[in-house]
Image (cartoon, rainbow, N blue to C red):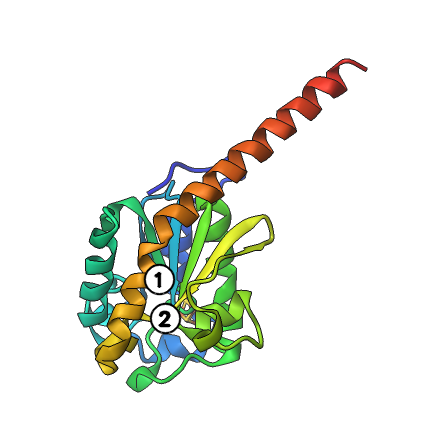
Amino acid sequence: MSAERRDGDSLEKVAEEVRKCTLCPLCKSRTHAVPGEGNPRAKLMFIGEGPGYHEDRQGRPFVGAAGSFLNEMLSSVGLEREDVFITNVVKCRPPQNRDPQPAEIQACSRYLERQVQMIDPAVIVTLGRHSMAKYFPNERISKIHGQPRRIGGRTVVPLLHPAAALHKPELKQTELEDFARLPKILEEALARQSGEDDEGSQEMDQLKLF
Ligand code: SF4
């Protein structure tokens, strides 16, 4: 996890707060909250919907069957879980794996926002329609999956949830094909970021002349 930032915030602090959080009713039914895990300096950040049964038991994201498929997709593009950061829009399991409700997503967004700010990934990948809706409200995942967009100075890619392929095996190939585009999307996002950094430092140099 990350070192403490200048403002005193850290991923560890977020995780500690999440484990004690009672901001929404999901705290009542959880076994373990699931703050998220991975590389604190990840260039790729994955945001799923919410913990399921196995995640709730272990306090870790994507450890069930959908997690195995996510691992498989990561390794298909030469990545390990340790290379990326993985979390969810809600950090506690909705009972019977029901959809997270808007008020729960809203209550939990304070943690996600801090995680995104601290990790500062070049690319955010949303997994499933509930995390997609955070960045692409009123869009349909069946129409926009796999298509990157620039949102708030960051590249965001909506992907189908890995569990979708478990329920509908015909989606597995679609998911693998969307995933296969991620390295190129990341490369372009990083190139763009370094171009913007260069422009920023040139502007600073020009300012120093005055
Ligand atoms: S889901 Fe989020 S807001 Fe709700 S209790 Fe868990 S950590 Fe708190």
**Measured from the top left, where is residue 161 in percent x and y?**
34, 71
Q: Which residue is mark 1?
A: 178
Assess disc 2: are there few (<14), some (14-19) or many (≥20) residues with their C-alpha within 10 Å of its C-alpha: many
Residue sitting at x 45%, y 74%: 141
Amino acid under disc 1: Asp
Please give left or right for residue 186 compared with residue 137 in the image: left
Determine the quadrant in which ligand 1 lies. bottom left
**Measured from the top left, where is residue 195 in percent x and y?**
56, 32
Please give left or right for residue 128 compared with residue 209 in the image: left
Quadrant of the image containing the C terminus: top right
Observer-nearest residue: 23 or 185? 185
| Residue 15 location, quadrant | bottom left
Assess disc 1: are there few (<14), some (14-19) or many (≥20) residues with their C-alpha within 10 Å of its C-alpha: some
Residue sitting at x 66%, y 23%: 202
User: Is the CB of the residue bearing disc 1 within 8 angstroms of ligand 1?
Assistant: no
Q: Which residue is mark 2?
A: 160
Name above or below for residue 75 compared with residue 207: below
Point out the frontmost of discs 2 and 1. 1
Observer-nearest residue: 190 or 39? 190
Residue sitting at x 53%, y 38%: 193
Q: Which mark is residue 37?
A: none
Q: Which secondary structure, mark 2?
A: loop
Question: Quick one: label 2 or label 1, which is nearer the N terminus?
Answer: 2
- One can see residue 15 in this view: yes
Name above or below for residue 141 compared with residue 188: below
**Measured from the top left, where is residue 1 in percent x and y?**
32, 43
Please give left or right for residue 15 compared with residue 204 in the image: left
Amino acid under disc 2: Leu
| Residue 67 location, quadrant | bottom left
Disc 2 and disc 1 in contact, CB within 8 angstroms: yes
